[in-house]
Amino acid sequence: MKKVLVVDDSETVRQQLGDALSRAGLAVIEACDGLDGLERVAENQDLSMLILDVNMPRMNGLDMLDKLKENPKTAALPVLILTTEAQSSMVARAKQAGAKAWLIKPVRMDLLVDVVQKLTN
Amino acid sequence: MTEREHRIKRETSTAKLPVVDTLIQSATVAVFHAWGVATAPLSPGELSPDSVHLDFPVGIVTFKAPGINAALMLSLPPALSDRLVARQGGRADGRDLLRELTNLVMGRLKNRLTLYQVAVTNNLPACRERMSELKSLLPKVGPFTAYRFRTLDGEILVALKGSIDESRLSYSSTIQINAEGDIIIF
């Protein structure tokens, strides 16, 4: 079973994503900010992809993305950004850092699951 | 509409913040629509924080830009809050859900202000349980404007406290923004 790490400081969002992705046959683990997310990545060597929020306490999603790409062990993991942020400069930064997609909240769950399935296959 | 027409519209409007009023109302309606809640905006009014009935907890996010120093608050009627929590399978934390809804309204407002050539920075949204906690986060100056929205479960209240200089907002029809719900594949 493909395993997805959802990193978002909102428990509500993590639950919504967890429910939708589980129904699609994916295993989901959660983290509440970038630092917590890096710990989950270190503990789970079999991750298929990550979904990152941007604005989070302690470490934001873009800084976490940079850390993932700096590490040869995690650099190839597909990353999807899910956020309320829509500024073109931030989108461009994520693209340059190696993210695969940027989704602006609120997004339809069926469309999000479709993107996740494409990125994990 | 040309910039001149925008300026005339702003100067002749009876509202003190015609642009921001419209943006907050449209942002709130759109966010709650996405969550399956129909809302009807009522006329905004300038009040004192103590004269407004806020259903606690209240979601709050502070934001800044050149000419802007303000806080956005969101208060839900208990029946609506209960319904939204129940819709999440009853597992959701009402305070977290309120914080996320505040985040979504702020995100939409911030995105729309980009069209007016304003780059807003905001803090992380928070939730406060009582007025004394809320007041400590509010900007000291500027009016308190309440935006009410009728729903089948009571009235949603969005409030704005602080200073916003609308003369600094200059609409540009050439700025392209990414919209909520957009999926950008790299």
Image (cartoon, rainbow, N blue to C red):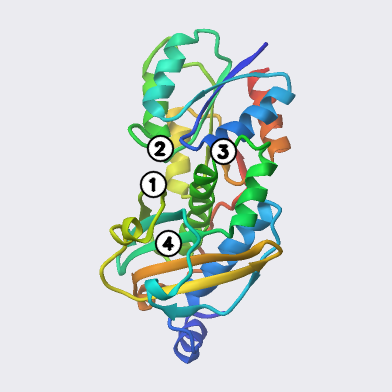
Res. B124 mark: 1
Q: Is mark 4 in CB contact (under 8 Å) with mark 1?
A: no
Residue corresponding to mark 3: A12
Q: Secondary structure at mark 2?
A: loop
- Mark-to-mark CA distance, 2 and 4: 18 Å
Q: Is mark 1 in CB contact (under 8 Å) with mark 2?
A: yes
Res. A56 mark: 2
Q: Secondary structure at mark 1?
A: loop
* Mark 4: amino acid: Leu
**The residue marked by circle 1 belongs to what chain?**
B
- Mark-to-mark CA distance, 2 and 3: 14 Å
* B131 to the left or right of B59: left
Circles 1 and 2 on the same chain: no
Q: Residue at x 38, y 46 (%)?
A: B124
- Mark-to-mark CA distance, 4 and 1: 12 Å
* Mark 3: amino acid: Thr
